[in-house]
C-alpha cells in the first residue's frame, strides 16, 4: 500500500507534462497558469540536486548513528544482528513518520531512512542463524526489503533493486552456474510478465509508468544473464556446450522480440533498452564465436548504426504527414531537446578526453593527446 | 482521475482548444511517438565508432597503406563532411539556432574528430608541430569556433576537453590532481572557462552555452581546491579560498535558482573541511569520528531543509 495517493502521484506527473508542453509551445503560459492550481498537491518536494545532497547527508547520519551505538556499546555478534533488525524497523518507521507527519515526497531524507532500513535488514538477515555471513539470506532479505519499500514509498529504484536482488538469489545457492542462471532467468521472466500485466492494467498513467520501467529492467537483466560474455564476472559459466550455444541464440532473439514488443506497445523505456541490447549483441558476436576482432570492425559497426539511423529517419519521414503509425523522426517536446543538450555537455567527460600532460612516447605512431576525439592517445 | 480525464475536463471548460486537446491526447496515448533521441544516440555512437575504427585501422596498416593514402582518405573525409556542414548551415546568429537536419550535428562532429585525427597523424608521422601543445591548442581553437558557428554542444565539449588537454589536465580520472602544478593548472583552467562563459554571455553570444562553461569550470576549480586542501603540503592555502568559493557557489546557486551549484558548494566544502577537522582532531577514536559525522551531517541537513523549503521547491 503506497503512502501517497494515486491522484497525488498522477498530479505530480501531470505537472511535469504541463511544464514540458508549455516549453514546447503546445500550451500557452496563460493556459499553464489556469491548470496549475488544479495540479497542486499537498506534499513537500524539492529539486533533484537538493534531494540528492539531502539523501547523501541523511544516509551519512544514519550510518554514523548506528556506528556510534556499535562502538560505544561494544556489541557482540548476536547483539549486532539484533541491532541491525532493530535499526531496520526503526528507520522504516522514521521514513513513514517523515512522510505522514511532514508530507515529504522524494525529499532525500525519508529516502535515506527507507534505504537504510533495507541495508540494516539485509545485514541482520545475512548474519542471523549463520556462523559467518550468508549471501543467500542477504539476497532474499534485500529483495524483500526493497520490494516493501517500493510498495510503501513508490521509489522506482527500490523496485529495480528488488528485481535484481530476486534474480541474484539463485547465485547464493551454490549450484552449478547453468542451473543458477536458468533459475534466475525464470525468475526474471516471471517478473517481466507480472510487471507487464500490471502495466497493461493501468495504461501509461501512474502506476503503469512505474511498472513499465520494471518490465524493461527485467528484460535487460534477463538478457544480461543470458549473455555469458557480459555476465561471466558474476558467475563463471560452465563448459556446457548446448547451454553456451542456446544463450548465443537467445542474445539474438531477445533484442528482436523486445523491439517488436516495444514498438507494438509504444514503450519508450523498453525500446531504448532493446536498442542498447541489440548493440551489445553485435559487440558480443565475435567473442561468442571465438573470433579475433579486426581493426575495421568498429568502422563496419559505426557505418551500420549510421545507416540504420538515417534509413529509419527517411522511412518515417516518407510516410503520410511525416510519420508512420504515429512514429515520427523529429522531436515533439522540449524535453527531448534538453536530453540531447545534456548529453552534448556530458560528452566533455566521455572516454577519449585528453590524458595527462606527458611527453609523447618515442614510438613512431603513438602518444597523441588530442581531446575527446577518439584520436587521443595512440593514433 | 487519469491524464486523459484531465484533458477532457480542460477542453470542456474551455482552457484548451479542440486542436490542442487532439494533439495532447495523441501524445498522452502515445499515438504520436518521437524517436528523435534514439536516432540521435545511434548517430553519435556510429560516428564515434567509425572514427575509432579508422584510427585503429590506419595505425595497424600504416606501413601497407602509406602516409599519402592515409592523408588522402582523412582529407577527403574532412572536406566532404565540412563541405556538407558549410553548404547546409543556416546563417550565423548570436541566439540559439536549430540544426537544419537530424544528421547535421553528427556530420559536424565526425568532421571535427577526423580533423583531430589528421592533426594527430601529422604530428606522429612528421612532427610538424614539434610537440603536442600546438596541435592541441589549434584543435581547441578550431573546435571552439565551429561550436559557435554551428551552435553545437558536442563540439563545444570537444573544444573544452581539448583545451584541458592543452593545459595538461585529465578529467577522466580523479587522480589527475596529484601535484600542486596540476591543481593550479586546473584552477586556472576553471577560471578561464568561467571567464569565457561569462564574457560571451554578457555580449549575448550563444547564451545557452553558459551552463556548460559554468558546470565544467566550477567543478575543475572546486575539485582541484578540495584535493589541495586534503593532500597538498600547503593545505591552508587551498582551504581558505575553497571555503569562500563554496559559500559563493551556494549563495549564487540560491540566488539564480541553479541548485546544482548549491550541491557542489555543500559537498566539496564539507569534504575538505571534514578532512581538515578530522586531521586536526587526530584522536584515532572511531567514536569521535562517528560523532563528528552525526553532528555535522545533521547541521548540514537542517540547513539544506531550510533552504529547500524556502527556495528549492520547484522540481
Image: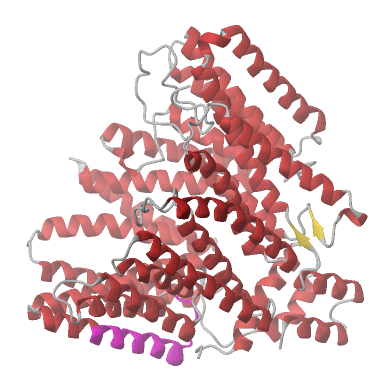
**Magenta residues?**
A85-107
Q: Is residue A103 magenta?
A: yes
- Front residue of this view, candidates A96 and A183: A183
> Is B236 drawn above or below residue A93 in the view shown?
above
Q: Is residue B300 magenta?
A: no
Whole-percent x, y for residue A378 in the image:
44, 23
Q: Main secondary structure of the magenta part?
A: helix
Residue at the spot 87% in from the left edge and 87% down from the top edge: B12
Whether residue A175 is visible to the viewer of this picture, yes or no, is: yes
> Is A335 drawn above or below residue B220 in the view shown?
below
> Is A225 drawn above or below residue B50 in the view shown?
below
Q: Quadrant of residue B11?
A: bottom right
Left or right: where A11 falls relative to B218: right
Q: Quadrant of residue A11?
A: bottom right
- Front residue of this view, candidates A91 and A300: A300
Residue at the spot 42% in from the left edge and 48% down from the top edge: B219
Colour logic: secondary structure
Whole-percent x, y for residue A273 in the image:
59, 58
Amino acid at each position: 500500500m503506497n503512502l501517497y495517493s494515486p491522484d497525488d502521484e498522477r498530479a505530480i506527473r501531470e505537472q511535469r507534462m504541463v511544464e514540458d508542453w508549455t516549453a514546447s509551445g503546445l500550451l500557452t503560459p496563460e493556459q499553464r497558469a489556469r491548470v496549475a492550481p488544479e495540479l497542486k498537491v499537498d506534499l513537500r518536494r524539492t529539486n533533484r540536486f537538493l534531494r540528492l545532497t539531502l539523501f547523501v547527508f541523511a544516509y551519512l547520519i544514519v550510518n554514523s548513528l548506528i556506528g556510534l551505538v556499535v562502538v560505544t556499546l561494544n556489541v557482540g555478534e548476536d547483539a549486532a544482528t539484533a541491532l541491525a533488525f532493530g535499526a531496520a524497523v526503526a528507520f522504516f518507521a522514521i521514513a513513514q513518520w517523515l512522510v505522514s507527519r511532514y508530507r515529504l515526497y522524494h525529499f532525500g531524507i525519508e529516502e535515506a531512512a527507507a534505504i537504510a532500513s533495507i541495508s540494516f535488514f539485509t545485514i541482520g538477515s545475512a548474519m542471523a542463524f549463520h556462523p559467518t555471513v550468508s549471501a543467500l539470506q542477504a539476497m532474499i532479505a534485500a529483495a524483500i526489503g526493497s520490494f516493501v519499500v517500493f510498495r510503501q514509498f513508490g521509489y522506482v529504484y527500490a523496485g529495480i533493486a528488488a528485481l535484481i536482488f530476486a534474480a541474484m538469489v539463485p547465485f547464493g545457492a551454490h549450484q552449478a552456474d547453468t542451473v543458477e542462471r536458468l533459475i534466475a532467468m525464470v525468475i526474471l521472466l516471471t517478473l517481466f510478465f507480472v510487471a507487464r500485466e500490471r502495466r497493461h492494467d493501468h495504461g501509461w498513467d501512474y502506476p503503469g509508468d512505474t511498472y513499465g520501467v520494471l518490465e524493461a529492467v527485467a528484460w535487460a537483466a534477463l538478457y544480461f544473464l543470458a549473455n555469458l560474455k557480459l555476465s561471466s564476472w558474476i558467475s563463471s559459466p560452465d563448459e556446457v556446450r548446448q547451454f553456451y550455444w542456446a544463450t548465443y541464440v537467445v542474445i539474438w532473439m531477445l533484442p528482436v522480440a523486445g523491439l517488436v514488443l516495444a514498438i507494438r506497445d509504444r514503450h519508450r523505456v523498453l525500446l531504448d533498452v532493446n536498442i542498447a541490447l541489440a548493440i551489445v549483441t553485435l559487440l558480443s558476436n565475435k567473442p561468442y564465436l571465438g573470433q579475433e576482432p579486426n581493426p575495421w570492425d568498429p568502422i563496419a559497426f559505426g557505418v551500420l548504426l549510421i545507416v540504420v539511423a538515417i534509413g529509419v529517419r527517411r522511412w518515417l519521414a516518407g510516410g503520410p504527414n511525416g510519420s508512420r503509425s504515429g512514429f515520427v523522426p523529429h522531436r515533439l517536446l522540449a524535453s527531448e531537446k534538453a536530453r540531447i543538450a545534456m548529453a552534448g555537455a556530458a560528452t566533455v567527460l566521455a572516454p577519449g578526453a585528453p590524458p595527462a600532460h606527458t611527453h609523447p612516447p618515442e614510438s613512431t605512431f603513438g602518444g597523441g593527446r588530442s581531446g575527446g576525439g577518439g584520436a587521443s592517445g595512440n593514433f | 482521475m487519469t491524464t486523459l480525464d484531465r484533458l477532457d475536463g480542460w477542453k470542456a471548460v474551455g482552457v484548451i482548444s479542440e486542436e490542442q486537446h487532439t494533439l495532447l491526447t495523441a501524445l498522452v496515448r502515445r499515438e504520436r511517438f518521437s524517436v528523435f533521441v534514439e536516432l540521435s544516440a545511434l548517430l553519435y555512437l556510429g560516428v564515434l565508432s567509425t572514427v575509432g575504427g579508422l584510427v585503429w585501422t590506419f595505425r595497424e596498416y600504416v606501413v601497407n597503406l602509406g602516409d599519402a593514402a592515409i592523408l588522402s582518405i582523412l582529407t577527403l573525409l574532412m572536406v566532404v563532411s565540412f563541405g556538407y556542414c558549410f553548404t547546409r548551415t543556416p546563417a550565423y546568429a548570436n541566439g540559439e539556432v536549430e540544426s537544419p537536419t537530424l544528421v547535421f550535428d553528427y556530420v559536424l562532429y565526425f568532421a571535427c574528430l577526423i580533423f583531430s585525427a589528421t592533426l594527430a597523424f601529422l604530428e606522429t608521422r612528421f612532427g610538424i608541430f614539434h610537440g603536442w601543445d600546438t596541435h592541441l591548442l589549434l584543435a581547441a581553437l578550431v573546435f571552439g569556433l565551429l561550436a559557435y558557428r554551428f551552435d553545437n554542444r558536442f563540439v563545444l565539449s570537444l573544444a573544452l576537453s581539448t583545451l584541458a588537454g592543452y593545459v595538461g589536465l585529465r578529467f577522466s580520472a580523479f587522480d589527475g590532481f596529484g601535484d600542486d602544478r596540476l591543481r593550479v593548472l586546473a584552477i586556472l583552467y576553471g577560471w578561464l572557462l568561467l571567464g569565457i562563459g561569462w564574457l560571451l554571455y554578457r555580449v549575448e553570444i550563444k547564451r545557452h552555452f553558459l551552463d556548460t562553461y559554468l558546470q565544467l569550470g566550477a567543478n575543475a576549480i572546486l575539485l582541484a581546491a578540495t584535493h589541495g586542501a586534503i593532500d597538498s603540503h600547503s593545505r591552508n592555502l587551498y582551504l581558505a579560498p575553497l571555503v569562500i568559493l563554496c559559500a559563493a557557489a551556494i549563495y549564487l546557486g540560491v540566488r539564480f535558482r541553479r541548485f546544482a551549484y548549491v550541491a557542489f558548494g555543500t559537498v566539496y566544502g564539507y569534504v575538505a573541511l571534514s578532512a581538515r577537522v578530522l586531521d586536526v582532531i587526530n584522536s584515532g577514536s572511531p567514536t569521535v569520528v562517528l560523532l563528528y559525522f552525526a553532528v555535522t551531517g545533521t547541521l548540514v541537513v537542517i540547513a539544506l531543509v531550510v533552504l529547500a523549503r524556502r527556495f528549492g521547491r520547484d522540481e
